[in-house]
Image (cartoon, rainbow, N blue to C red):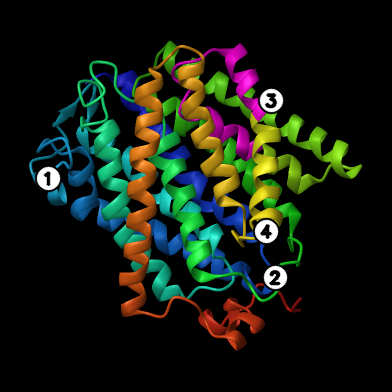
Amino acid sequence: MNGADTAWIIVATGLVLLMTLPGLALFYGGLVRARNVLSVFMQCFAIACLMSVLWLIAGYSIAFGDEGPVWGGLDRVLLMGVDATTIKGTLPEVLFFAFQMTFAIITPALFLGAFAERVGFGFVLLFSALWMLGIYAPVAHWIWGGGFLSDGGIFGDIGTRDFAGGIVVHETAGLAALVLAVMIGPRKNRTTPPHNPGFVAIGAGLLWVGWFGFNGGSQLAADGGAAMAITVTHISAATASLTWALWERVKFGRASLVGLVTGTIAGLASITPASGFVGPIEALVIGAVAGVLCQEAVALVRNKIRIDDTLDVFAVHGVGGIFGTIMIAAFGAGDWIAQLGALAIVGIFTVAGTWVLAKIAGLVTPIRVDAETEFNGLDISAHGERAYDITS
């Protein structure tokens, strides 16, 4: 065990949890109507709790067990065989478990934005549980746990390069968001603007800081690689923020706060898979393109295809993660066949699996709330609370 590595990953674990609680909760909560903000907070907190328990019970074992190329097996169920002295690499394995648990928390929390304001709380919890165990954990094993997409797998010695989750986190969550948005259908009123842009900006700021743990911690060591990952993460986020705002100014004659910070998230998502393989100049390019690319993806999904992905999860996270994964090969840091092949395999598996699991969950609990509940807002209807004294 290395003390410096251990200390850094302890910090990184806290930073990644910060991304969900309260970062993503505030970011998403500010984007919805005032009558639904507490439902978003509730869903983020409840998913954090539920995924933590399920990661302990079986998720970690499925993702990082040693059974085979498709799934990790059940040898680490309830952390059997793991105590404070068990080592994984240079870290206590229980710390590696905790760090990876925070990824398992935020990934299903991301697709909450696709169906915000119209889905029942029971469905959110049941589907997220099935999805984390049935989609996220196997994909994590395929790429990070020694599965068939990693080094030595079906693509040869140079397997899929995904440093911190362009495929494992952002592609899976983004495609799940798109499938769910199509299955559930649009809101009755899609035109209401974000009720609290200040929440959105604060949440984005917390996500930005937390992303240093997300990407820098994925080095699993306190070394120059972690420092470079943090640096390129920051450069990409800053550049994408500027290009998003500039492109808004070109198209609409003004730049918005919500747009600026959405560009931040686009830059962060896009650099995530490449953050361990590129330098500052490549990060500048990735961020510059991401700010425009993801903004155009938002317009395409909203206005051309007319899919009500409420908070643009696919356009920002899905497109950003896929773009960053491809750029690894474009910059010569990965193999084209491995990168594109993994994107295709995981994409097909995620789309099909998400559809099946949503159908199964829908047999147990209603997916969508009724029209009256949607009109009144989920805060008072589902949880009996209001965020504010007045409604909007």
Q: In the rendered image, which quarter contains the C terminus?
A: bottom right
Tell me how far mark 1 sits from mark 4, CA to CA: 40 Å
Badge 4 crowding class, 10 Å Cα cut-off, few under 14, some 14 to 19, many 20 or more, is many
Question: Residue 371 in magenta?
Answer: no
Residue indicated by mark 4: 30
Tell me how far mark 3 sits from mark 2, CA to CA: 33 Å
Q: Nearer the viewer, mark 1 or mark 4?
A: 1
Residue plotted at (32% across, 64% down)? 357
Tell me how far mark 2 sits from mark 1, CA to CA: 44 Å
Instruction: Check disc 4 and give the amino acid type.
Output: Gly
Tell me how far mark 2 sits from mark 4, CA to CA: 8 Å
**Residues rendered magenta in the picture:** 264-289
User: Which badge, 3 or 1, comes first in the chain's sequence?
Assistant: 1
Tell me if I can see residue 327 in this picture: yes
Residue 17 image offset from top left, x and y in percent: 44, 45
Label 1 near label 2: C-beta < 8 Å?
no
Label at residue 288 = 3
Residue plotted at (36% across, 50% down)? 350
Q: Secondary structure at mark 3?
A: helix
Residue 49 image offset from top left, x and y in percent: 36, 59
Q: Main secondary structure of the magenta part?
A: helix
Label at residue 34 = 2
